[in-house]
Image (tube, coloured by chain):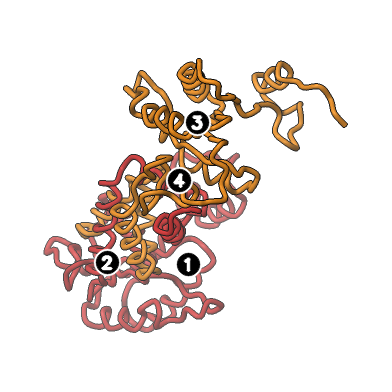
Chain colours: A red, B orange
Amino acid sequence: MQSPLIKKLIDAFTCLPGVGPKSAQRMAYNLLERNRGGGMHLSSALQAAMEGVHHCQRCRDFTESTLCGICQSERRDKSLLCIVESPADVIAIEATGGFQGTYFVLMGHLSPLDGIGPEDIGLDQLKRLINEESPSEVILATNSTVEGEATAHFIAELLKGTNIELSRIASGVPLGGELEYIDGGTLMHSFSGRKPYTS
Amino acid sequence: MQSPLIKKLIDAFTCLPGVGPKSAQRMAYNLLERNRGGGMHLSSALQAAMEGVHHCQRCRDFTESTLCGICQSERRDKSLLCIVESPADVIAIEATGGFQGTYFVLMGHLSPLDGIGPEDIGLDQLKRLINEESPSEVILATNSTVEGEATAHFIAELLKGTNIELSRIASGVPLGGELEYIDGGTLMHSFSGRKPYTS
């Protein structure tokens, strides 16, 4: 007996990550009951973003222009190239304010079982970029997961023979972390990756 | 450095209930990376619903027509009127398949502190409806919360002096519930509301 428009809206909401039928229903009714303006605003923001946002020609991050803001900027150090898996990683690193180099966004990681190979994560483009710009250091900042490590390893193999310095972000106990509550894998990693103590 | 269109989209997502900045970002990037079609579909479903859905003239439930499907139906028993707080309650009751009467949807509950009075929950319209249709029984199916009980009480007062049978849905231990894990309030309610045992 539900109105077809509401049914369609609830269905459409379930395409969002982490939204099942129950939350979708809650979202639909909440907008209809209390916030139609917000709903219309979300509708137009969605359309504008889906149509207007594409990939930066240099780094593959999302942008509305040919080049993204970071790639356009004169202030960024192009000799330092940081490879990440997703645009959200760029935002997380930018939020720290501690990195002044540029990025290359893979938009995923290698996953042969899902049919995601080197071309799908833009490794051809990465190779061309490195040939053109020849950065002095490439930082492999893929996730510290099995797939992320495998992708980092693959890229490292790809860049073998060039005289580019390759580095991998450190993994170990998070700042403020207590050893008692850290998982065994991380703890072993932080032991094998130990460094000379400097005070 | 984030694209303005993406920023706007993330902002717009936070108008949804239970969606904070972090989930909003995840939703925006998920759609952009993996499901642009789904995003466009959501956009048009939103616009259609926000513009096309309004209230049923008889019961105040959401509908695209003058009367909702239940009010239009010839099969529903108009002598039985069930008063609920929200359209989601109608769906929950309809899903049980056990109720053949019609509804009146308050679209909220009395809440003097929030400035929600009798007119805001359509009690004028309810009175008119009852005068016109003079149902034999009105079921008060507002939530079993303080506000829901207060609203039920207010409506009961309103209908005093008419010869309509008034009932309130039972509250007590849920089916399959174990007494050990039921809160004290519910347990006391199920004792004070006990009925003669029939096998």
Do pointers 4 and 3 mark residues of a single chain? no
Please report whichever mark, 4 or 1, sits nearer to the chain's N-terminal start. 4
Callout 1 touching callout 2 (CB < 8 Å): no
Do pointers 3 and 1 mark residues of a single chain? no
Front label number (4 vs 2): 4
Q: Secondary structure at mark 4?
A: helix
Q: Secondary structure at mark 3?
A: loop
**Whether residue B92 is situated above or below residue A133 in the rendered picture:** above
Residue placed under numbered mark 2 in the picture: A62
Residue placed under numbered mark 4 in the picture: A26
Query: How far across and down, in percent of the image, does residue A43 sit?
Result: 28, 57
Q: Distance between the Cα atoms at labels 2 and 3?
A: 61 Å
Q: Secondary structure at mark 2?
A: strand
**Whether residue A109 is situated above or below residue B67 in the rendered picture:** below
Residue placed under numbered mark 3 in the picture: B134
Chain of the residue that carries numbered disc 4 in the rendered image: A
Q: Distance between the Cα atoms at labels 4 and 1?
A: 36 Å
Q: Which sits in the foreground, A60 or B116?
A: B116
Classify residue A105 as left or right of residue A170.
left
Callout 2 touching callout 3 (CB < 8 Å): no
Q: Is residue A69 visible?
A: yes
Chain of the residue that carries numbered disc 2 in the rendered image: A
Classify residue A147 as left or right of residue A106.
right
Front label number (4 vs 3): 3
Q: Is residue A16 visible?
A: no
User: Of the residues shown, which amino acid type is indicated by label 2?
Assistant: Phe
